[in-house]
Image: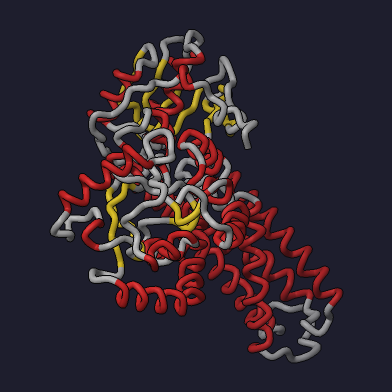
Amino acid sequence: MSDSNDTNKNSNLRTVTKYSHVPFVRHSHTMKKSELFFSFIQVPVDFLMIILAAMTAFSIRNVPQILALKPKLYEFPFNAYLKIILMVAPLFILIYAIEGLYNIRVTKKFWREMVKVFTATSVGLVIIIVAIFLKREWFSSRFIILAAWGLATLYITIARSLLHIFQKWLLRKYGLGVHRVLLIGYNGKMDLIYKLIHRKKNLGYRVVDRISNARLKIVRQIKEEKGIDEIIVCDPYLTDDEQEKLIDFCAINNIGYKYIPTTLQTPRFEMGVLSGEPLIEIKHTPLDGWGKILKRTFDVIASIVGIIITSPITLITALLIKLESAGPVIYKNERIGADGRKFFVYKFRYMKWECCVTKENNNLQKALELEKELIAKQSVREGPLYKIKNDPRKTRVGNFIEKYSIDELPQFFNVLLGSMSMVGPRPHQKREVEKYMEYHRRLLTIKPGVTGMAQISGRSDLDFEDEYKLDLYYIENWSLWLDTQICLKTIGVLFRKRENL
């Protein structure tokens, strides 16, 4: 992980201005909601078309005197046939996904998509033929198999055609799904790109501005005034330092970054072609489009399982806290989450109520003063975060539940409600975020997590800069398998005593 190019960036290449305040601006998302919707809706539509094709093939076989060369050789129960089709249909959806048929973009080439439909359906056909050869008790009607293959290709093509036409109509009529693009550079190549976008509206781009250089002040102003979804750069004089800052700005603000290459600074990219020109798109994180859908699905399932499994511990902990000290069992702590949104993290209260820093505490001012004093004298962390060693504000129950992270179990409800994820950077307080360097704001581009790379690598013992590097690695290299590994490793970490407490 430490070998990652981005995690080893020298801080003197960054803009290191500390924020005197934190302007929480909502991001313009490069993946449009309309594109996400149409890509998502293709899954159930394809599934229904496969079922319809199979049922049509079965029905046609029941009219042998019209369409079949020979009468039916045997009767096959429809209920048994339907069960087989319901098992087979998800296989075709999986093949379509592997073939890239659920890529999210309104401007994808329709005829190429249809070739992929034909190819993927044919692959599915071959798998079905092999399966029937090995398991003949399914059924042996070659007519049904071939008819279902042809009809599935036809039905899916028609359904996708209608969706495609409707999506294009929304794009032309209402601009739904149009990507606002900023062009950086004045040269022959960029002139061609500029003219092409203006001439072909179906490409799904709208040029909001065109500038000669990549000065962040100008780019930021254009974003605030006109909005930017993507930036296309073709500037041979762009320095590595300028490009690095621009890439960070785009990542922080969820703006797509593409350029006609003069230099290549990152392995995280996708190749494309626009009007015959090679185009490289920097991938800030896999957590976009389908990655976001898969991660949310994982979060919902994992949080429900977590709530059920830990419910006995949760009930016992709540009872012990209530018996030991006055005050609410759950402590709501305001934190900063994805896109700079404020939200409340739920935790079991492990401090005496009069020491809790919350608006609900009548002694809030005294609690704040005590906390500042303890941070100055007993904090064992460097950077914008703090960790108080031998904190005198804890109760006896609180000391135990924090040591083994039992206090964080209510955060499963944060995950279920959508303000947090199972895995991600830990959420920080506003006063901590205000001390971020500019590049640290990459941590605010995804939902904070109950656990993360830093937690399985050192929990609260790491310096903030080391924690940032681990979290940045996670953002840039996310996968469901990585989430699963981190969750499993977290279970083992919980049973090790925390240091610096």
Percent x, y of residue 375: 32, 41
Number of disc labels: 0
Report the front residue among 332 and 316. 316
Residue at position x 79%, y 82% in the image: 70
User: Which residue lies most toward the left here?
Assistant: 362
Position of 464 with respect to 151 (left or right) is left
Q: Which coloring applies here?
A: secondary structure
Residue 316 visible in this rendered orientation of the protein: yes
**Rendering quarter of residue 279:** top right
The answer to whether residue 150 is above or below residue 463 is: below
In the image, residue 348 sits, relative to residue 274, either above or below, namely below
Residue 242 in the image: above or below residue 289 = above
Judge left or right: residue 120 versus residue 126: left
The reply to whether residue 167 is visible in this rendering is no
Q: Residue at 32% of width from left, 37% of height from top? A: 376
Corner quadrant of residue 228: top left
**Residue name at image x 53 percent, y 24 percent:** 9
Tell me where residue 48 appears, x and y as whole percent: 53, 70
Identify the residue at image location x=36%, y=39%.
178
From what the image shows, is residue 67 above or below residue 276? below
Judging depth in this view, the residue of 397 and 136 nearest the camera is 397
Q: Relative to residue 395, is residue 53 drawn left or right?
A: right
Q: Nearer the viewer, residue 140 or 444?
A: 444
> x%, y% of residue 358?
22, 55
Q: Position of residue 339 (x, y in %)?
A: 34, 43
Residue extending farthest to the right is: 134
Q: Quadrant of the N terminus?
A: top right
